[in-house]
Image (spheres, rainbow, N blue to C red):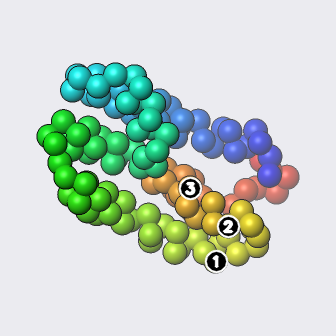
Amino acid sequence: MNIRYAFKRSLPVMAGYLVLGMGFGILLEAKGYGAGWAFCMSLFIYAGSMQYVAVDLLAGGASLLATALMTLMVNARHLFYGISMIDRYKETGAKKPYLVFALTDETYSLVCSGDVPEGGG
């Protein structure tokens, strides 16, 4: 696959991630948490929407059970993303589990939006 084609297709997603990431940092700072929290949450929580929810859960003193249930509910849609890609990724070999795991709302839409043109674009 042509890297240039993939980069051009992912620019809008990257721009969105940058804006959402800055918003997350501002919200976290407003709740009294520093940059270390933002870094760790970005590293360990693989769901941008759950990062936003986690700020209020942390600030409100939510229990571990409440946090786990909320995480399950917020991210349940990813199960369906993964299931719908099993056939599409059938020939990716050892990469398949990661490709299914790494789907986000935005990457799912890019993957579903069409095939790579002949020659990679």
Q: Which residue occupies the extreme front position in the image?
A: 64
C-alpha separation, residue under disc 3 versus residue under disc 1: 16 Å
Q: Percent from the top left, x then y, of residue 102?
A: 56, 55
C-alpha separation, residue under disc 2 versus residue under disc 1: 10 Å
Residue in the foreground of this view, choosing between 118 and 43: 43
C-alpha separation, residue under disc 3 versus residue under disc 2: 10 Å
Point out the frontmost of discs 2 and 1: 2
Identify residue for label 1. 87
Q: Which mark is residue 64?
A: none
Q: Earlier in the sequence, mark 3 or mark 1?
A: 1
CA neighbours of label 2 inside 10 A, class few (<14), some (14 to 19), many (20+):
some
The residue drawn where x is 60% and y is 58% is 111
The residue drawn where x is 23% and y is 40% is 58
CA neighbours of label 1 inside 10 A, class few (<14), some (14 to 19), many (20+):
few
Residue in the foreground of this view, choosing between 96 and 59: 59
**Is residue 23 something that shows in the picture?**
no
Q: Percent from the top left, x then y, of residue 67?
A: 25, 54
Dot 3: element = loop
Q: Percent from the top left, x then y, of residue 13?
A: 52, 40
Q: Percent from the top left, x then y, of residue 2?
A: 80, 46
Q: Which mark is residue 96?
A: 2
In the displayed structure, 50 sits above or below 92; it is above
Are circles 3 and 1 on residues that touch, CB within 8 Å? no
In the displayed structure, 55 sits above or below 46; it is above
Residue in the foreground of this view, choosing between 94 and 40: 40
Dot 1: element = loop
Q: Image quarter for residue 11?
A: top right
Identify residue for label 3. 102
Question: What kind of residue is marked 2?
Answer: Lys
Are circles 2 and 1 on residues that touch, CB within 8 Å? no
